[in-house]
Image (cartoon, rainbow, N blue to C red):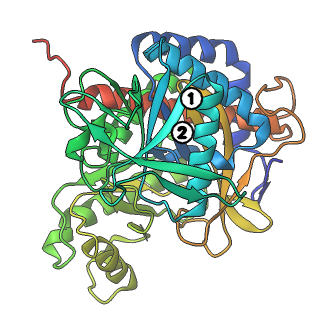
């Protein structure tokens, strides 16, 4: 199921696909050497945009919540990857404490938790759920759409360890992005493995740090393949003191918008691309899908009555956003049943375990799809999509296209490893 593309499946993406397949041994060796030097995030999900002329990540989630969107055929690989991840961290692990988000009324999120429990149980662990919600003071049953239940239990914190009543875990897995801050109950856990680490949460993490690391990774990878890194890398800028209440507070954003649009126009001219460039302004910290605004001209931000300026004010000020990343907009020309779509690649440790499409019938090719009304379609190929088929005409093989998605997803995952190393507050600094 390679989705229908409005543009013909030709040009740079097909050239990139062919080059990636030709270079597969070198690529896999390169990744192997990188993982000898860097530790991958425990799990991750990467949103990709396929413009036909460019394929790039636009967001990397270190607390993925879409495991229920994976097909049953993908589960064995997820279980094997989970086994490998746990063996590397805590080989003798018996108990895993899963700490979820507070979306316990969201049936889709509960299905994600159910799938995570299934994967790690089959990986050989006793899995129980502990809630950060102080209102959960006794075991609480959560009904699932299929008629089964999950039990959410209150956390118990001792001086150095976190667990549940009668349950002492070796490893604590967070499925909560900590956007609201770091709970004291999670601080100072030195005897247990806390995954991902606290500085991976949005209380401390910044998207601009991630894309700075991704730019470094993309340049290395592009050098390996002898290609232009722009074909896989979204350009970006960052502003750290934004106020949408007055024009002066948006001066940095306007400057970055002008600069980025000029750079993208030059690239479009170089590649003969007729599309009109745009940029996306988003909160630098946080996974809020609403805090995303598309800008096509910097002048849109100087007029207080312009719809773009009003939308920016409504989304940013309403949520207290003062730091933003300005990112090159990558249109998506993928469609499923005429709805705009973008692929999401899901990984555990350094392994691609599957993927799905996020689709939105009410959004355009230059808009954020991670918004209310979005739906999800598993990458349900009729046959195994994990193994590529070198030699098949580019654009004609679903496994080849998915392999390419997986390569770009792993580049973003590697960038997250670089990012977490660079921002680790406990890292030793050598003079």
Q: Residue at x 38, y 27 (%)?
A: 168
From the top left corner, tell me how far across and down residue 349 is, in percent.
Answer: 52, 25
Query: In front: mark 1 or mark 2?
Result: 2
Question: Viewed as shown, does residue 10 lie left or right of 250?
Answer: right
- Give above or below for 27 relative to 141: above
Judge left or right: residue 48 versus residue 69.
Answer: left
The residue singled out by tag 1 in the image is: 227
Which one is nearer the viewer's eye here, 353 or 401? 353
Which class describes the residues within 10 Å of circle 2: few (<14), some (14-19), or many (20+)? many
**Compared to 320, does 114 lie above or below?**
above
Give SS at disc 2. helix
- Along the line of sight, the residue nearer the viewer: 333 or 43: 43
Between disc 1 and disc 2, whose residue precedes? 1
Q: CA distance from mark 1 to mark 2?
A: 10 Å
Which image quadrant: the C terminus?
top left
Above or below 191: residue 200: below
Question: Residue 338, how many percent across, how many down?
Answer: 77, 68
In the image, 278 versus 76, the foreground residue is 76
Note whether 40 is above or below 263 in the view shown: above
Query: Can you identify the residue that label 2 sits on?
Result: 232
């Amino acid at each position: 199921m390679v989705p229908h593309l409005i543009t013909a499946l030709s040009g740079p993406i097909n050239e990139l696909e062919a080059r990636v397949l030709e270079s597969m041994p070198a690529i896999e060796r390169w990744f192997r050497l990188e993982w000898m030097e860097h530790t991958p995030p425990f799990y991750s999900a990467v949103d990709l945009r396929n413009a036909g002329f460019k394929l790039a990540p636009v967001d990397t989630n270190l607390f993925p919540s879409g495991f229920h969107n994976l097909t049953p055929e993908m589960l064995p690989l997820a279980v094997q990857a989970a086994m490998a991840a746990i063996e590397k961290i805590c080989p003798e692990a018996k108990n895993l404490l899963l700490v979820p988000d507070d979306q316990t009324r969201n049936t889709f999120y509960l299905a994600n938790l159910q799938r995570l429990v299934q994967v790690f149980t089959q990986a050989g662990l006793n899995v129980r759920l502990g809630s950060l919600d102080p209102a959960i003071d006794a075991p609480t049953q959560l009904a699932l759409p299929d008629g089964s239940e999950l039990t959410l239990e209150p956390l118990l914190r001792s001086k150095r360890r976190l667990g549940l009543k009668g349950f002492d875990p070796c490893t604590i897995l967070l499925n909560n992005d900590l956007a609201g801050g770091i709970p004291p109950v999670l601080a100072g856990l030195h005897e247990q493995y806390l995954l991902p680490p606290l500085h991976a949460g949005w209380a401390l993490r910044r998207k601009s740090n991630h894309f700075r690391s991704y730019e470094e990774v993309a340049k290395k990878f592009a050098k390996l393949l002898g290609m232009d890194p722009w074909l896989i890398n979204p350009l970006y800028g960052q502003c750290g003191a934004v106020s949408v209440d007055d024009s002066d507070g948006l001066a940095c954003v306007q400057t970055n918008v002008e600069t980025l649009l000029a750079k993208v126009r030059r690239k479009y001219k170089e590649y003969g691309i007729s599309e009109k460039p745009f940029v996306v302004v988003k909160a630098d910290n946080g996974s809020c899908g609403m805090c995303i605004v598309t800008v096509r001209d910097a002048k849109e931000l100087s007029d207080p009555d312009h719809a773009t300026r009003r939308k920016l004010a409504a989304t940013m000020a309403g949520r207290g956003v003062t730091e933003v990343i300005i990112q090159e907009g990558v249109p998506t020309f993928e469609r499923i049943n005429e709805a705009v779509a973008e692929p999401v690649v899901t990984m555990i440790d350094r392994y691609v375990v599957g993927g799905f499409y996020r689709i939105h019938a009410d959004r355009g090719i230059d808009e954020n799809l991670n918004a209310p009304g979005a739906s999800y379609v598993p990458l349900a190929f009729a046959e195994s999509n994990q193994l590529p088929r070198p030699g098949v005409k580019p654009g004609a093989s679903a496994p080849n296209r998915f392999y390419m998605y997986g390569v770009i997803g792993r580049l973003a995952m590697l960038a997250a490893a670089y990012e977490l190393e660079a921002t680790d507050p406990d890292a030793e600094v050598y003079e």
